[in-house]
Structure formats: C-alpha cells, structure tokens
Image (spheres, rainbow, N blue to C red):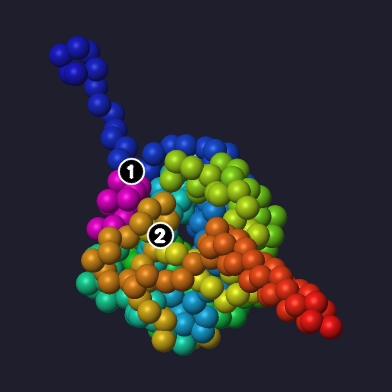
Amino acid sequence: MADAGFEVLSRDNGLPTRSRQHFKGCPTFRGDRTATVLVAPAVALALRRGAEAAQPTEVGGLLVGRRFRDKHGPYVVVLAHLQAPLGDGSPGRITLTAERTAQLRTLAAAHHPSMDVVGWWHSHNVPSEYSRVDRESQLLWSDPLHVGLLVFAGGTPWGFCYLGSTSVLLSSDTPVLAELAGTDRGEQTPGNLQSGRGAIPGRTKLRAWRRVLKLRPKHKGGIASSGGKGHPPVVSVSGGEVPAAWGAPPRRSWDPQQHNTAVLYVVILVLALGVLVLAITLANLSFR
C-alpha cells in the first residue's frame, strides 16, 4: 500500500459494528458502565421452560451468540443455548466438568458454526442471587463480555444476568416473559431464525395437555453451581438434535393421534356393550 501512496495509520481488531436495533424486542440486561446483554425471545422462553421442567434439579449449559458494538458501546446477543444432561445436576447444585464443557463447545461449533460461546447459564428454583459457588465458577470466564445467566424455574423476574469474571449484576428491562408468548405462534424472532423455522402452531395447547397428563416432551437436539432449589440424563441444543451417543433414553411424549385412537376404541367398546345389553333384553322379552 505504501507504493500506491497509502499509509496505514491504525489497525482495529475489535468488535464488529452492528446496530442493536437489529435485535429490537429481545429481553435486555443493562449496566451503568458495562456492556448490554440481549437474549433472543425464543431462547429466553426455552431456558425458562427448561428450568421449570427440571425442578427440583438444577440444570445448566452454555450460551451461544455474537458480540458487537454500536454508537452506544459494546453488547452481547445470546442467540442459542446448550443444556447439559440432567444427571449433571441435583436439587440445589449443577456441575459442569471440564470434559462436559468441552463436549458442549464441540456441539456449539457443529450446530452454530457462525457463532461463538459467549458464556454459561444455570437454573435456580426460585429468584435468588449468585451463590458463593456461582461466583467462583464465574471467575473461570475471564473475558469482560462473558455472560453468566441465572434462570429461575418460577417467580419474577425470569432471570438475572452477570457479566465478566467479577460477576457484575445487570438490571433487566424485561423481568416478565409473558409478552413474548407470541414466539410460540410461529413468529420469526432473532432466536428461532437461527434454526431456519418458526415455532410449531398449536404447541401451547399441547404443552398444557402435557402438564395435565404429566408427560414430558421429546428432547431435541469444570463449572459448578449451588444455591437454587432422579431425572435421566438429557442433552438439548437449541436448533437441533443431540447425537444418541450421549445415552439419553427415549421419553414419553404427547401424541394427539394416539390419543384420538384410544378415544375411538373406548367409544366402540361402549357401543358394543350397549348392543349386547339390548340383545339380551330383547331375548328375555321374546321368551315371555
């Protein structure tokens, strides 16, 4: 370039520039002098429901997304998540070994090659702050933009967000996720766009039936935590299925077609009994 009359004045190897307006509508966590964290609506809902389904066991895993900057400063967008097997947790504790974390990183690279691991997450049964063990685990995430997301299985707010190795607590702009329920009706969001499809219409009704019948849905697709309140091991990855080599056993799921077939059999059986009773009654009358 010098031969062409150009001179390199400086090099910038920092964060790529992109306006956060592209992620408008995401639940947001802000700090006074720190970066902002945005969570895709579909991911926030999936984390909340995953924590709820696992009670009283704590669950956790890795967060996947991108880091950008704009005129307001740096920010992190969480676009997907990975969940470790339920066997890694227990009531009040979740442990992600170095081996498990490496496995999750491999899955993240395979399922989300255009994104980076931006932090970790785990659940508590009720709203509560980081425990001593949680803060010690956050020390392993040395980058100032590494995210620690604490998701609550019930109550308000739905979660807390910590940033960097010093566990800086951010304030939430979206403590309740009720207004995000539209993502269950197939609307495209920054979260479900990553999988190339929207949510399945009618999924909300099926979830309600699962809760009534106590059936669980089919699962697709060195860190310890303690402080929040036997499930078989399950690994979930937002946007894809997990290889069966991890040994997650098949679990019962709600199948509307099987339900309708069972109802039909019951109706046929009742009608058959009615015909039998009528035949016996007519036979008795004919002998009188």
Q: Nearer the viewer, residue 47 or 288?
A: 288
**Disc 1 designates what residue?**
114
**How far across and how far down the image is residue 225, in percent?**
41, 81
Picture disc at residue 80: none
Q: Quadrant of residue 85?
A: bottom left
Q: Are marks 2 and 1 in contact (CB under 8 Å)?
A: no
Q: Amino acid at mark 2?
A: Lys
Magenta residue span: 105-120
Secondary structure, mark 2, is loop
Disc 1 packing (10 Å; few <14; some 14–19; many ≥20): few
- 212 sits left or right of 55 in the view: right
Q: Amino acid at mark 1?
A: Ser
**Residue 222 part of the magenta segment:** no
CA distance for labels 2 and 1: 20 Å
Q: Is residue 143 visible?
A: yes
- 199 sits left or right of 267 in the view: left
Q: Who's the residue at 60% across and 75% down the image?
A: 213
Q: Quadrant of residue 179?
A: bottom right
Quarter of the rendering occupied by the N terminus: top left
- 202 sits left or right of 287 in the view: left
**Disc 2 designates what residue?**
220
